[in-house]
Image (cartoon, grey):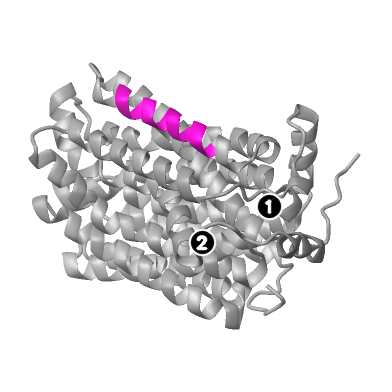
Amino acid sequence: MTIATPPPPGRHDLRAARPWVGPGFTEFVAIVALMMAVTAISIDNLLPAFPAIEARFAVEDPNRLQLLVYVYMIGFGAAQIVYGPFSDALGRRPVLLASLAVYVAGCVLAMLAPSFGWLLAARVIQGIGAAGGRVLSTAIVRDRFAGREMASVMSLIMMVFLIVPMVAPAIGGMMLALGSWVYVFVSMLVLAFWLTLWFGWRMPETLHPEYRRPLSVRATAQAVRVTLANRVAVGYATALGLMTGCIMGYVGSAQQVFDTGLYRLGALFPVAFGVVAGAMGAATLINARVVRRFGMRPLSHAGVAAFTAVGLAQVAIGLAYDGRPPLALFLGVLALNQFLISFAMPNFNALALEPLGAIAGTASSFLGFYTTTLGAASGFLIGQSFDGTVLPIGLGYAGLGALALAVVAWTERGRLFRSVST
């Protein structure tokens, strides 16, 4: 037995038949962006605390500190497969609020950590809690929007989401200035409480009653089969996962590259990190403005192709300078590539979910699990290859970019850059 996804017009009719009673567009984008931003905050504002954590727990290998990022992503990726089916059965609101409670528990356990192993376990729990925001933010947007409109909204959300890395390391640095790395987790607690109050007060249930699904292994398995049978969903999710691997490889290595290992920027580390994040934020804003005109496919295909080309340039520059190019040159090329990746990732996300509107929660959950797991594994390989040079990042960008471009070509049966209804 298979589940046929209802045609898009039917879903549009359901949205039109139920007037929106929630926050206005700007506030809606801000709330959903904050749901996604929990993940970025939980990673990026901890980066400046790595040296303090290393000293507190006598971590001998600096590369082990990257586990604070990657174990978080393991919990984050694995838990996503649970939230979607629950939200399709119970609704978005109760599941999101429950996930925030898990996240808060992880924060508290991290603050009480007596050992590095305990801290890693707490980070897994944090990731499990944060996964709810990742899955449900996408599902809530899909509940309300479709096609190019959805891509535009996702780009705006990603723009707000990407502003976070510009300020998160600085926030982490300020927390450290108060006297302890523990205060970094206090800032995460404050964010979680703020989101809980704002979402609980202003965001209504977005799942239409006719799209509620029974909470059962059989129903979930059927929805997963529908997802896996869709070439567009699987192809663009795979490309998104590979692009996510580039981001995770960079984030995992950033503290060593900019702060303690290569360029030794110290207190200026958040500035360098913010420059790169600012390039991503600018690109997502541009994407949100132009995607309605040009369509998701041409923009994302051009973005990943150009990203791969610049990745090859990163490798060439790294080799030319024995893996240690001047900071300004490295920052410029890296920022350019982060700019280009932001034309691919939001559109890949929307394209993967677009054909699966009737099972948006479960589809978002499964695809989120898949893309995050693929991204974390790919990023881990890049991060653990750090050897005191920028070559692993350049090689990772060029290799994963080329793979993503090949997957997109397979998905579209070789017809790249074409403009269709989406």
Mark 1 burial class by Cα count in 10 Å: few <14, some 14-19, many 20+: many
Instruction: Name the main secondary structure of what is drawn in magenta.
Output: helix
Amino acid, disc 1: Val
* Left or right for 326, reference 236: left
Q: Dot 2: what SS?
A: helix
Q: Nearer the viewer, residue 94 or 345?
A: 94
Q: Which residue is painted at 57% across and 72% down in the image?
A: 301
Q: Which residue is painted at 22% across and 50% down in the image?
A: 169
Q: Nearer the viewer, residue 19 or 44?
A: 19
> Magenta part of the protein: which range?
96-109
* Left or right for 240, reference 181: right
Quadrant of the rendering where the C terminus is positioned: bottom right
Badge number at residue 345:
2
Amino acid, disc 2: Met
Residue 330 visible in the snapshot: yes
Residue tagged by mark 1? 234
Q: Is residue 98 magenta?
A: yes
Q: Residue furthest right?
A: 1
